[in-house]
Amino acid sequence: MNRYHWFVLTVAALGWLFDCLDQQLFIMARQPAMKELLAESPEAPPSQSVVDAYSGYATAIFLIGWASGGLVFGVLGDRIGRAKTMLITILMYSLFTGLSSLSVSFWDFAAYRFLTGLGVGGEFAVGVALVAEVMPHRARPYALSLLQALSAIGNVSAALVNIVVGGLYEQGLLPSVWRPLFIVGAVPALLCLVIRRHLKEPERWQQVSHEGAVEKQLGSYQALFGDPELRRRALIGLTLAFSGVVGLWGIVFFTMDLVGNFVSTKLAAEGVAPEAIAGQAAKWKGTTGLMLNIGAFLGMYSFGVVTQRIGRKPTFAMAFVASAISTAAVFMYLDQTSEIYWMVPVMGFCILSLFAGYAIYFPELFPTYLRSTGTSFCYNIGRFLAAAGPAVLGVLTSQVYADTAEPLRNAGLTMCVIFVIGLIALPFAPETKDQPLPD
């Protein structure tokens, strides 16, 4: 790999890193945001089940925006170029993340999250297409797994920011425990200056866009579904993504809320002041995010190494099984802060390894003129369907398990069945190990 290869990988990694920073800041902020925005008055806060339910609804709306943006910007990535589209998406998610800090009700908060999701959803497909097309053949899977693994730095950064903000709020130095998180999320806009000045379009894309755009229907869903083999690959990729995305966004990312709930309950029983409870809950949720992403970094990079040895399909199979077992164990047994330090990293290793698989595998399924479109379809239609996951969790929490001692714990455990869907799809998936990218 030469200097420009490393530059492209760095820029794409930063774009996805900041994308993940935004996602995690939202996860850290949504519960305290719902407590404030849904309260009739400071003396009349909403119940925990209402907070959990609306946190799920806000997450579903964010995922719908993510999926919508992915579909639109996936096509744009094939039509106007990877670099230009990346610039637009980063500007969008940075701007509307910052505006989320100004929310005064659930509905404007949800609107900002939807608009943020538009930008967040578009970045992944163009980023992995860019890296896949620029990297040398042998370096490609390792570069893509590293790209995905480095996203854990964004997640860890969000956890550290949340710990710091929680500490400052507990000491009375900040007026809000969640609004400053979204202000930090506006910082990635500065990356656009680098992209605008130095990043070039891949030669593969330039050749296809100049020589065969009309004949090959550059960035066309009609072309994607008009070819039986490409259609089959798109639907298989969609199913794989659906299983992992629901598992992550509908279950795993609610581990922070699970931790916040049992920490708050224990401290309230001890007579601790509400402000101190909020600060401690934020600290332990941040610690949970930190542990999750330490495991995630190792899991995502490991997927790239293992899949080059045994193949894409066997590695996916092991990851789905491990994700189901580790996630169910967390929601069944995690009830002490000391357990966060080993149970959560194991779960992060397993579930986030799947997403390195998506970054490696999806670009290998489609030709250059449909690579961004096809990758975006798999990942973002999967996310459209997966938006039902947090909503279902909200229903399970607020209705089905509302009368139980810990509704969120029972709801998360029930939803672990989602990982079976990914396993069912694998026998129909093509093996792409050691094959060149389709032209």
Image (cartoon, rainbow, N blue to C red):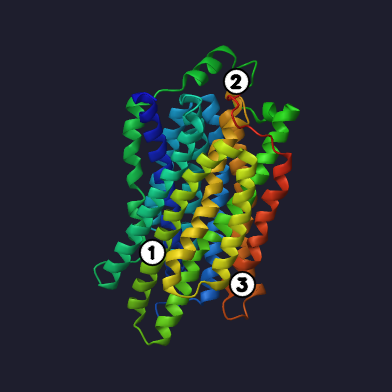
Residue 29 location, quadrant:
bottom left
Where does label 2 land, which residue? 439
373 w.r.t. 115: above or below: above
Where does label 3 land, which residue? 410
Where does label 1 land, which residue? 287
Earlier residue among tags 3 and 2? 3
Residue 49 image offset from top left, x and y in percent: 55, 74
Q: Amino acid at mark 3?
A: Asn
Residue at the far right: name it: 228
Q: Amino acid at mark 1?
A: Thr
Q: Secondary structure at mark 3?
A: helix
Residue 154 image offset from top left, x and y in percent: 39, 49
Earlier residue among tags 1 and 2? 1
Q: Amino acid at mark 2?
A: Asp
Residue at the far top: name it: 211
Residue at 49 percent of width and 65 percent of height: 343
Marks 3 and 2 sit apart, C-alpha to C-alpha, by: 47 Å
Marks 1 and 2 sit apart, C-alpha to C-alpha, by: 45 Å
Residue at 39 percent of width and 59 percent of height: 290
Crowd class of label 3 (few under 14; some 14 to 19; many from 20; radius 10 Å): many
